[in-house]
Image (cartoon, rainbow, N blue to C red):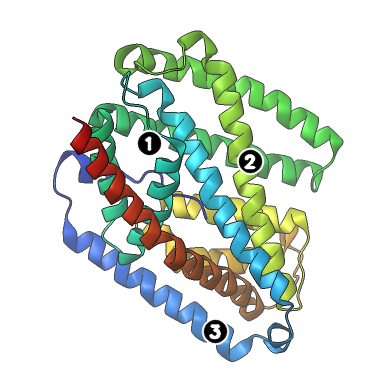
Amino acid sequence: MSDPILHPEQVDDVVRPARGWKRAAAYIVGLGLLAASVYLAVNKADWSHLRQADRSDIALLCALVVANVLTNALLFWLATKPFEVPGQPVKLREWLAMVAGTALLNYAGAKAGLIGRIAYLKKYHGISYRANVFTLVALAAGTASIYILIAAILLWRDGVDTTGLTLGTLALVVLSLVGWLFIKPAVGRFGAGQIARRDLPVWIFVWSILRIVDAVVYAGRLMIASHVLGKPIDLELALTAAVVCNFVVMAAPVPGGLGIREWLGAAIVKWGFKGAVVMDLAQGAGILVVDRVAEVVTLLALGPLALLYLHYRANKIDNNR
């Protein structure tokens, strides 16, 4: 699970009321695509291995969903550090709660999660709307750059090897310096946080590594989902699908890439790495559906607790003022 980062309509939600009918239409289309992928998987995929799946595999799949919540919380926690108001830091556990809670709320289709998060940061931590929007733009640009880098290395090196990892690390250093040139003026304008401008390149590099870890964790989810269905896929294919699916979650007009993630992920799993057919589309859809179910079940367990914690935290801040 990659947290929804930015779509043009989401910026509109911050600065003026969004056109609700567009969101509703996108949500309905997403639900339709999701229903179609579930129908295809249920009726055409082979589910015999799932009935015999080891419970530890299912538990590990849900644990990796939790790990994605943690990596996304760390990503946003790092990203907002330069813009924090002195004396009002955002605690990491608050980000854990915001990521888990907003991920659940976004399944409602109203993008209430993103809007609520920005409002929470403004009211209880003094992070301005402009700083919030800039952070979203920077995160979107950084994420897209890293995903393009991963895809390029996978295609060029036919997978993951020492040469690819070395060149990828050097490319990350270059991207960190470019990101520093982009972010430095905004930190000077909006920032008052704990990260000095001179430390930004290192901070951006650490953030970039963490974004890659997030993609690898999601790739692990897809590998486990494919294993429990009896059609295991390798790391290269899983990472390719993970990058595409995470990009869809980031950019799609419907929160969580509902439906779109399933079909694109299934297509990548079907045609494999560099177009070699691995399995039929229904089996690929089954893998993505299993992963989606694990995500929803995990968020249903975490989300309400996260929202309760945010309510408690907000009341505590209000009472201390």
Under mark 2, the amino acid is Ile
Q: State the separation of the CA atoms marked 3 and 1.
A: 35 Å
The residue identified by callout 2 is 212
Per the image, label 2 sits on a secondary structure element best described as helix
Q: Nearer the viewer, mark 3 or mark 2?
A: 2
The residue identified by callout 3 is 40
Q: Residue 43 at x, y = what percent?
A: 57, 91
Q: Would you identify the image quadrant in which residue 211 lies? A: top right
Q: Residues within 10 Å of mark 1 (few under 14, many from 20)?
A: many
Q: Would you identify the image quadrant in which residue 41 lies? A: bottom right
The mark nearer the N terminus, 3 or 1, is 3
Under mark 1, the amino acid is Leu
The mark nearer the N terminus, 2 or 1, is 1
Q: Residue 101 at x, y = what percent?
A: 37, 55
Q: From the viewer's perspective, is 244 left or right of 249?
A: right
Q: State the separation of the CA atoms marked 2 and 1.
A: 18 Å
Q: Residue 199 at x, y = what percent?
A: 53, 13
The residue identified by callout 1 is 136
Under mark 3, the amino acid is Leu
Q: Residue furthest front?
A: 320
Q: State the separation of the CA atoms marked 3 and 2.
A: 31 Å
**Towards the viewer: 241 or 98:** 98
Q: Residues within 10 Å of mark 3 (few under 14, many from 20)?
A: some
Q: Residue 48 at x, y = what percent?
A: 71, 89
Q: Is residue 168 above or below residue 308?
A: above
Q: From the viewer's perspective, is 82 left or right of 274?
A: left
Q: Is residue 159 above or below residue 177?
A: below
Q: Residue at x 24, y 66 (%)?
A: 24
